Every structure is written in structure tokens, then in C-alpha cells.
Image (cartoon, helix red, strand yellow):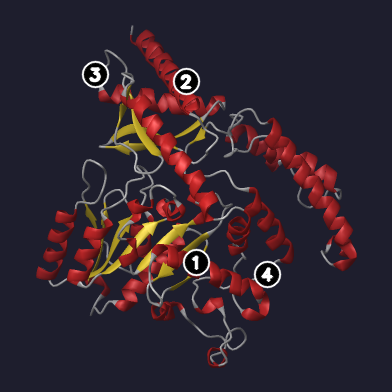
Amino acid sequence: MRSHLLNGLTAEHYRRSVTEGVERVAAKLATTERPFTGVTADDLTPRIDAVDLDRPLGDTAAVLDELEELYLRDAVYFHHPRYLAHLNCPVVIPAVLGEAVLSAVNSSLDTWDQSAGGTLIERKLIDWTTERIGLGENADGVFTSGGSQSNLQALLLAREETKAESLDKLRVFTSEVSHFSVKKSAKLLGLGPDAVVTIPVDHDKRMHTVALAHELERCAEEGLVPMAVVATAGTTDFGSIDPLPEIAELCAQFGVWMHVDAAYGCGLLTSLKHRDRLNGIEHADSVTVDYHKSFFQPVSSSALLVRDVATLRHATYHADYLNPRRMVEERIPNQVDKSLQTTRRFDALKLWMTLRVMGADGIGELFDEVCELAQEGWKLLATDPRYDVVVAPSLSTLVFRYIPAGVTDPAEIDRANLYARKTLFASGDAVVAGTKVGGRHYLKFTLLNPETTAADIAAVLDLIAGHAEQYLGESLDRAS
């Protein structure tokens, strides 16, 4: 069994095995004609259940053959131009190369004696990102597993920086269309059930700052303590960007921690055309970025950035076996001093490789392409009488609803849209997402693939309409 350990003696075995795997994936990418096969859980579960994990196949080729049947054939392929659903991006090749390197070397980014150069590369990328945001010379941060963890840590820091006699008095303010992780984080942090105050949004799905000011004033009047305002730069459903300069002014006025969840909109940090949409983010106390959304990085690659490095002390614990206090005096850079995680992958390498091969402008060019594609999609939807589109895109998301001629029952229209989405997914011809607006079912395109074209969008809209019309026809037949 030692022949399977990666070391100097097995380097050739490693090269052959990885090459076999890469060739299988490359062949699959080259021949995939649809983003999904339409396989169901009922179809796939028995095949996976039948695998006896106590009886290994013993051969890489045989395992790859099995993997083809159990995973590669039926995977959802985000690189396909008609995958239009969630915030999943196609990935750039330099980042995939970085993934291969970091997996093989297997550094752990918690302490210097486990990562050495990896620690410095991560710190360099954190500095690069904080400079792009404009957080100032005292800024710092750390890579995380994703936006939810970044938001959790940001609110932990905000809680610890806020002086309150009771956790029950703390309040967090965020828009009604912000990410669910805000409420989840509040619960994990032991805040009360009324801790998160949702602020209404305007027609463009941006936080109403007048309503925010009112709620902050009411909070003070009732003897409650404002802990944080969470602004969103790229909401999950609409891609909307809250008015960051106005929110920053209110946070300064009321002395409240300002967190910006830019998990989606962080791609604008590299934009050649639309960077101004993030104006005001430089005033934040903390910022979430998800490179694995709009920087075209493989999952996972995210970071929490803070204006003041001192606030990261709230996540610092010292263990004698790992990062004893003397290491601080000895200026040994241990990233675990900043992180909620201990063992942590060297995910920063993927972004490093991307920047060193493509440059920031290369990333920005790709993100600008999908933002421009969304504008084309908006025009298609706005002029198509079959559809109602909710809001013009700020980034690359479109939320819309099929409206059949002659049908006035909102519940029936809901069912037609749900049927269209489900049937389209089962066909494998395209994948779209869904959400609710005003309690009604809507469909959603999240455009993150520069290879997607306006023609793809038009074709998928025709498919959706066809499936919805099929449902309505069958429903009419049943009623008669």
C-alpha cells in the first residue's frame, strides 16, 4: 500500500495517475453538449448505493471508469454556456493548475511551520485585495471557505467591538434581499430572535437608506444597541448593490460597524468599466469577497477583509502545541491567529496563479463581459411580451416570469413557471434558477460565463415558454 503514498519514490506513479484523470475530464469537457443529463436522485442513488467501499478496485483506470458512470457523466457542468442558474462560474485554467499544485503539496495555512511561502503568498493577496478596496494601511484579512463564513466572522468581530450589557439588545441591520447567512450568523453568535432588522428595498432592490436611518434612530430610542449594518454589493437574487456611500455616512453618524457583503460584486474590483459601482466600499469596517464567484476561481476561494488589523484579535486563541504566544514576539506569521479555521487549504494559490498568468485586467475583462451580456438579456426580456422582468441588472443577474396570454390566475402562472423550470432541468438542455418576488414564483438567470451569448439566452427563453405552454395546455385539458 505504500506505493500509493505521494513521495519521491512514487513521483512517476503520481504523474501517470493524475494525467489519466486530467485526460478523462478534458475529454468530458470537450464532448459535453448539455449542462446536465437530467438524471434523477432515484436513478443515481441505487448505482452509488451498490458500490462496496470495502472492496477496492485497485486500479486507477477501473476507478476512473466507475467514476465516469457515477459522477462525470451526470455532473452539472458550469462551463456550459446554457448553465444559467446559480452563482457558479466557469473556472480559469491557471487556477485549476494551482489547485493541482496545492493538493499535491498539501500545505496547511494555519502556521508558518506548515506553510512557509504559502503564508506570505496569502498575505500578499490579502494586501492586494484591501488595496483594491481602499481600506487603508492598517487593513488585513484572511482567506475563508466562502461568503457565509466570511459574514459570520465579520459579525463576530462587530459583536466583540460593540459594547452592550446584553446580547439581546444587539441589532444587525440588513436589506430584505440580503443573504440568508446574515440571519444564520446572528443565531450562531447567540443573538436574540429579533436581532436582525430587515430594511425594505427600493424599486431597484437596493436598501432604503431613509428606512435604515429611521430604524437606527428607533433602536437608540428603545435603548437597543446597533451592532452592525450589513450592506450588500451584489444580492444573490438580483445582483443589486446597496447605496454604499449613504450607508457609510449613516454608520459613521451612529457609530455602527459597516460590513459589506461583496461576495458576488467583488468582481467589480477588477472591472475595467464599472469599478465605480463599488464606490463607498472603502468606508467599510469589513468586506466579504468570494473569488470563486466573480474571479472565476474553483471552489473554495473567499476572504474576509477588515479595515483595522487589531479587530482580528477577537478570533485569536493560542495553543502551546501550535501557535504559542511567544511566536507573536518572535514575529512568526501564523495565519491561524486570524482565522476561525485551524487546518486550512492553500486556496490562495489559485488566485495567485491567475493573477500571475492573466493579470487583474484579464479577470476584469471577463467579468465585464458577463455584465454586458446581462444588459443584452434585459433588453430581450423587456421587449418580449411573454415575460415580466423585475429589475434592470446591476451585475449579471436577471429575474423574470413567464406571463401567458389570457391567464390571469397568479397561482396558475406560478405553477406554469415552476413546471417550466423543472422540465427544463430534467431535459438537461439548460439549467436556470428560481426565486420568489412578492410571494410569487419567478425564474432567474445568473450569467457568469463569458461564452454564453444573447442567442443562448433567447433560445432558453423559447424553451421555457414552450414548457410553460405545454403545462397550461395539459392543465386546460384536465379542467375540461
Q: Nearer the viewer, residue 438 or 87?
A: 87
Give SS at disc 3.
loop
Q: Which residue is mark 2?
A: 463
Circle nearer the viewer, 3 or 4: 4
Cα separation, mark 2 vs mark 4, equals: 47 Å
What is the distance, in whole Å, between disc 1 and disc 3 at their CAs?
Answer: 53 Å
Q: What residue would you read off at disc 4?
A: 107
Which numbered marker is on residue 408?
Answer: 3
Give the Cα distance between marks 3 and 4. Answer: 59 Å
Residue 75 horizontal/vertical position (percent): 63, 38
Quarter of the view holding residue 348? bottom right
Disc 1 target residue: 128
- Going by the numbered disc 4, the residue's amino acid type is Ser
Residue 174 falls left or right of residue 337:
left
Question: Residue pushed farthest top?
Answer: 480
> For the residues carrying marks 2 and 3, which lies nearer the camera in this image?
2
Residue 28 image point, x, y percent: 71, 36
Q: Is residue 190 above or below residue 261?
A: below
Please identify the quadrant where the N terminus is shown. Answer: bottom right
Would residue 288 be visible to someone looking at this image? yes
Mark earlier in primary sequence (2, 3): 3
